[in-house]
Image: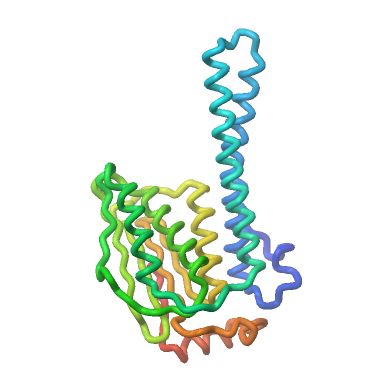
Amino acid sequence: MPIPRTSPECEGSPDLRYDECGRFCGGLDDGLHAMAQPLTILRSALAMLTLPQTSEARQRYYLETACAQVERACRLFEGVRSLVAVRLGEAEQSSFEIWDLLAPMIEVQSELLRESMIEIRLSNPGFRTTVVGDAERTEQALSAILSAAAAVASRGDVIELDASQHGMFLRIDVRNSGSKDTRLDASNRLGLSLAEANVLIQQGHYEFSEDPFCVSLALPLNQVDARALAGAGSLQESQIHRNSQFTLAQC
């Protein structure tokens, strides 16, 4: 779905560059597209329930199907609502240790993927550095990225995670080089849109490549005064990034 040059979400927001607005609208489109599937299945299941020849066993099946799709649609709706809330909100500023955030997340994901023989491999386990930012938003972003990487993984794949310090930035790369010729579904695309929004609102950088799967993000290690950046154009922002001597190359 092409993103129009002018969009209601952009109006009245001079600090929102067009490319960011396009990604934001694209995330909403992914969310709405994802919600269409469970609603379509729900409608079909309810229609089958009304047929007089439907057996009692089949009625139970269609009822369970309808309930599952309602839950799925509600989760997707919450994802869309969260995406809007992130874009309209402000990031917290507090110190947190990145490994303390990553370790339990990787442990849980690794356990879930163990039966599928999918491995999460860290290039530098125990890497420690303190970030001044929003720990909750960072956790949401990384969780969505790992979930998306797992969604396109096949048996025996290795999801590589690398965390390193580059000047004034923490850089995290998540790759699955075995995911060639695979495509994310709309639900995972919505999750990545939410991840991107959570990174950008912390004045970070975000890059994504789908084939093969790769997400690179960078978060500032020091406190960023969002008010000082409010209304800043791309020229000022690029100057800030040059001063930090950091460039996030695309995956």
Residue 115's quadrant in the figure?
A: top left
Q: Position of residue 228 (x, y in %)?
A: 63, 87
182 left or right of 237 in image: left
What residue is rendered at 66% in x and 77% in y?
Answer: 15
In the rendered image, the vertical position of residue 169 relative to residue 12, given as above or below: below
Q: Residue at x 47, y 85 (%)?
A: 222
137 left or right, relative to 104: right
Count how many numbered circles sit on residues in the image.
0
Tell me which colouring the rendered structure shows: rainbow
Q: Look at the picture and state if 155 lies above or below 61.
A: below
Residue furthest out toward the top: 53
Quarter location, residue 226: bottom right
x, y percent for residue 11: 74, 69
Q: Position of residue 69 (x, y in %)?
A: 57, 35
Quadrant in the picture for the C terminus: bottom left
Is the residue 158 above or below the residue 127 in the image? above
For image coordinates 46% across by 57% down, the residue present is 144
* Residue in the picture at 28% in, 53% down: 178
Q: Nearer the viewer, residue 64 or 245?
A: 64
In terms of depth relative to the viewer, which is nearer, 94 or 178?
94
Judge by depth and name the residue closer to the eye, 249 or 37: 37
* Image coordinates for residue 111, horizontal then vertical, percent: 31, 49
In the displayed structure, 11 sits above or below 43; it is below
